[in-house]
Image (cartoon, rainbow, N blue to C red):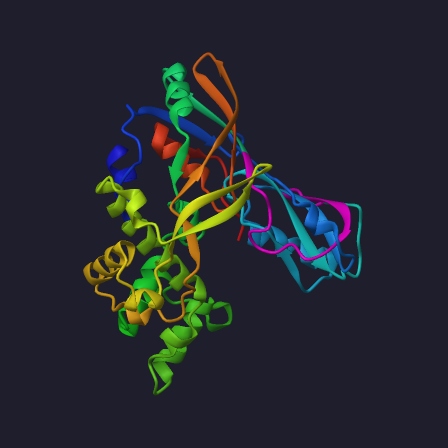
């Protein structure tokens, strides 16, 4: 089991850890052992155009949960602060613009929603953190508690969730795009979705059909979903940050400082640019690392022209709120800043096996 976990982590660019702890094998049974509560922002309630709902979901992705709710509310547009793990019990705030109906409570089984009031649009990243309550089964919970107590920062890796739940490792499509190899991308689509009726084709298959019939085969590159190139950006970032961690000089890659709101605090953290074309002319230590990773992957960094060069903190702080040990389990509550992954914390303190008791709805 450990071998397969390591292989998957390498697939996502997770090649290093920040701490050298002794890692015990631990089991997390999702979704009941993994709960997420979004920390709301008071700024959301300063307008009146949008209806704000607290949305609870169980074994379903944020996208699918909100699609179900939008049909009930008859609202064509919604916005949220962040995605929540599909293999979890999670609660988050969502704004819907001018819904035709506004029930105070909606129960769709795996999705529930409570009307909070009227307000302004909830923009991505505008929440002030996430609170996680996590339970692990482990032979020596005191050892895990010790590891947890020593963690003050975690690397800002993108977690496995970033690379797809229903269709894992979306960055592999992104690699084919960046290498300008539409044939490779087409073969990937063909192997994943062979022989389906044209009326039920996914967006990928439709692109494949067009690539077969259009004179210009680069339609696969020009019109493919942005999620693939964004997943590629996350993969390249993970690999580059892993290399910086390996050198034990992580603070030397800093390009800027960002200020974030975090669990009722405001803090400043060193940051770097996400992999993008903007790094072509840069000669910072970070830019050199990213360029070397692109070279290894067979990518010309100029081909990352559609990617946003936004800043991302090098690491994130964590706030441990409580720890409880009972028999062979440990339950702890932590608060993390927006965009930080609890799964990255978990890989620093245990050798994790996840038992999923649900599959995200399609």
Magenta segment: does it hold 32? no
Residue 349 is situated, as x and y percent measured from the top left of the image, at 36, 28
Q: Quadrant of residue 350?
A: top left
Among the 4 quarters of the image, the one containing residue 346: top left
Between 131 and 99, the one lying in front of the other is 131
* Position in image of residue 187 (x %, y %): 29, 68
Residue at 55% x, 46% y is 60
Residue range in magenta is 107-131
Residue 144: x and y in percent read 38, 21
245 sits to left or right of 82: left
Report the front residue among 58 and 116: 116
* Position in image of residue 291 (x %, y %): 24, 61
* Between 306 and 30, the one nearer to me in the picture: 306
Task: Name the residue: 27% across, 28% down.
Answer: 20
Residue under the image location 24 percent in, 36 percent down: 3
Q: Residue furthest top?
A: 327
Question: Residue at image x 31%, y 35%?
Answer: 18
- In the displayed structure, would residue 241 be above or below residue 209? above
Position of 94 relative to 300 (above/below): above
Of the pair 195 and 104, the residue shown nearer to us? 104
- Where is the N terminus found, in terms of image quarters? top left
Instruction: Please tell me whether residue 107 is drawn above or below residue 322 in the rendered image.
Output: below
Q: Assess whether residue 110 is covered by the magenta stretch.
A: yes
Q: Across the whole image, how many numbered discs are drawn on residues?
A: 0
Judge from the rendering whether residue 49 lies leftward or rightward of residue 207; answer left or right: right
In this view, the residue farthest toward the bottom is: 215
């Amino acid at each position: 089991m450990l071998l397969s976990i390591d292989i998957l982590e390498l697939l996502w660019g997770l090649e290093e850890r920040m701490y050298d702890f002794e890692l015990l094998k631990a089991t997390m049974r999702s979704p009941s052992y993994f709960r997420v509560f979004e920390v709301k922002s008071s700024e959301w309630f300063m307008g009146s155009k949008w209806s704000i709902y607290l949305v609870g979901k169980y074994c379903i992705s944020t996208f699918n949960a909100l699609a179900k709710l939008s049909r009930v509310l008859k609202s064509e547009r919604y916005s949220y602060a962040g995605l929540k793990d599909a293999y979890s019990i999670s609660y988050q705030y969502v704004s819907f613009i001018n819904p035709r109906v506004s029930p105070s409570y909606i129960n769709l089984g795996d999705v529930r929603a409570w009307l909070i009031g009227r307000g302004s649009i909830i923009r991505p990243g505008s929440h002030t953190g996430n609170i996680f309550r996590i339970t692990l089964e482990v032979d020596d919970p005191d050892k895990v508690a010790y590891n947890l107590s020593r963690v003050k920062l975690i690397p800002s890796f993108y977690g496995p969730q970033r690379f797809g739940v229903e269709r894992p490792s979306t960055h592999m499509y992104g690699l084919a795009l960046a290498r300008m190899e539409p044939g490779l991308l087409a073969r990937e689509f063909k192997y994943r979705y062979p022989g389906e009726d044209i009326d039920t084709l996914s967006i990928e298959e439709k692109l494949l059909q067009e690539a077969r019939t259009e004179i210009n085969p680069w339609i696969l590159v020009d019109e493919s979903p942005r999620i693939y190139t964004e997943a590629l950006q996350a993969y390249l970032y993970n690999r580059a940050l892993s290399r910086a961690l390996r050198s034990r000089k992580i603070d030397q890659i800093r390009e800027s400082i960002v200020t974030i709101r975090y669990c009722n605090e405001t803090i400043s953290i060193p940051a770097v640019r996400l992999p993008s074309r903007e790094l072509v002319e840069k000669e910072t230590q970070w830019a050199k690392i990213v360029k070397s990773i692109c070279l290894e992957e067979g990518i010309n960094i100029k081909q990352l022209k559609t990617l946003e060069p936004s800043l991302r903190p090098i690491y994130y702080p964590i706030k441990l709120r409580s720890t409880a040990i009972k028999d062979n389990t440990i339950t702890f509550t932590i608060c993390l800043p927006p965009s930080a992954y609890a799964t990255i914390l978990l890989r620093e303190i245990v050798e994790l096996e996840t038992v999923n008791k649900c599959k995200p709805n399609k």
